């Protein structure tokens, strides 16, 4: 991760943090850098407890180690002073997620990024609202990114094994 010398760090986002407006609510320095692929992980949806109510009313995104799989997402740059607010937004302070450092393959080379993985994962399908914010019809993340619609997705496996693994396309 870029550190104290640059005053910035790189963050690999998936799920609801693909949406710039959502990420920037608590992290105003977040700036689109590029898209990227995280190898040997898969995208899943769930909760950190079996029967927890949350603002999304359903499962939220996480990554899990899975050799041969891949997760596409967005690499953001953030100022170091937003590290605590990003951790809080991701539920690190409540034990819901843990930060990870991962190497993300991008068109600009491999980039070491911060990302997050859910603790105590219990599978749970995402709500229609979460799917809307996470993956559907957003073209505002950066100038060269667009997303496929996921309105027809009905279960984790279809999202994990097909649609979201090919979610991000470069228009250039």
Image (cartoon, helix red, strand yellow):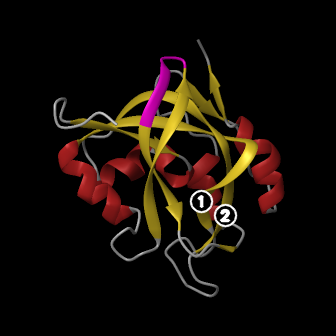
Q: From this view, report whether residue 117 is shown above or below residue 53.
A: above
Q: Is residue 10 left or right of residue 80?
A: right
* Mark 2 touches mark 1? (CB < 8 Å): yes
Q: Is residue 90 magenta?
A: no
> Does residue 62 appear left or right of residue 151 in this picture?
left
Instruction: Kindly identify which numbered label has been placed on residue 45.
Output: 2
User: Seen in the image, is 112 located left or right of residue 24?
Assistant: right
Is residue 110 shown in magenta? yes
Q: x, y percentage for residue 2?
A: 29, 33
Q: Residue at x 76, y 51 (%)?
A: 160
Q: Which residue is mark 1?
A: 61
Q: CA distance from mark 2 to mark 1?
A: 5 Å
Q: Quadrant of the C terminus?
A: top right
Main SS category, magenta section: strand
- Given the current orientation, which residue lies at the most extreme bottom position? 51
Give the image quarter of residue 8: top left
Hey, which residue is sitting farthest front in the picture?
Answer: 67
Q: Residue at x 37, y 77 (%)?
A: 94
In the rendered view, tell whether residue 49 sits above or below residue 131. below
Instruction: Work out whether residue 92 can be spotted.
Output: yes
Whether residue 152 is visible to the viewer of this picture, yes or no, is no
Classify residue 57 by image quadrant: bottom right
Percent of width and height locating residue 36: 56, 31
The vertical placement of 93 against 137, above or below, is below
Sequence-wise first label, 2 or 1: 2
| Range of magenta residues | 107-112
Q: Tag 2: Cα neighbours inside 10 Å, few (<14), some, or many (≥20)?
A: many
């Amino acid at each position: 991760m870029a550190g104290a010398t640059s005053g910035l760090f790189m963050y690999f986002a998936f799920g609801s943090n693909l949406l710039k407006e959502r990420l920037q609510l608590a992290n105003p320095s977040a700036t689109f850098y590029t898209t990227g692929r995280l190898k040997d992980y898969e995208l899943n949806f769930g909760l950190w407890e079996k029967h927890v109510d949350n603002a999304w009313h359903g499962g939220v995104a996480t990554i899990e180690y899975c050799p041969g799989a891949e997760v596409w997402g967005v690499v953001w740059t953030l100022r170091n002073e937003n590290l605590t607010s990003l951790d809080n937004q991701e539920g690190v302070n409540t034990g819901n997620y843990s930060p990870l450092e991962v190497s993300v393959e991008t068109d600009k080379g491999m980039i070491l990024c911060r990302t997050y993985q859910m603790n105590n994962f219990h599978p749970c399908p995402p709500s229609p609202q979460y799917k809307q914010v996470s993956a559907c019809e957003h073209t505002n993340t950066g100038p060269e990114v667009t997303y496929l619609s996921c309105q027809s997705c009905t279960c984790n496996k279809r999202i994990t094994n097909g649609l979201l693994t090919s979610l991000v396309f470069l228009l250039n």
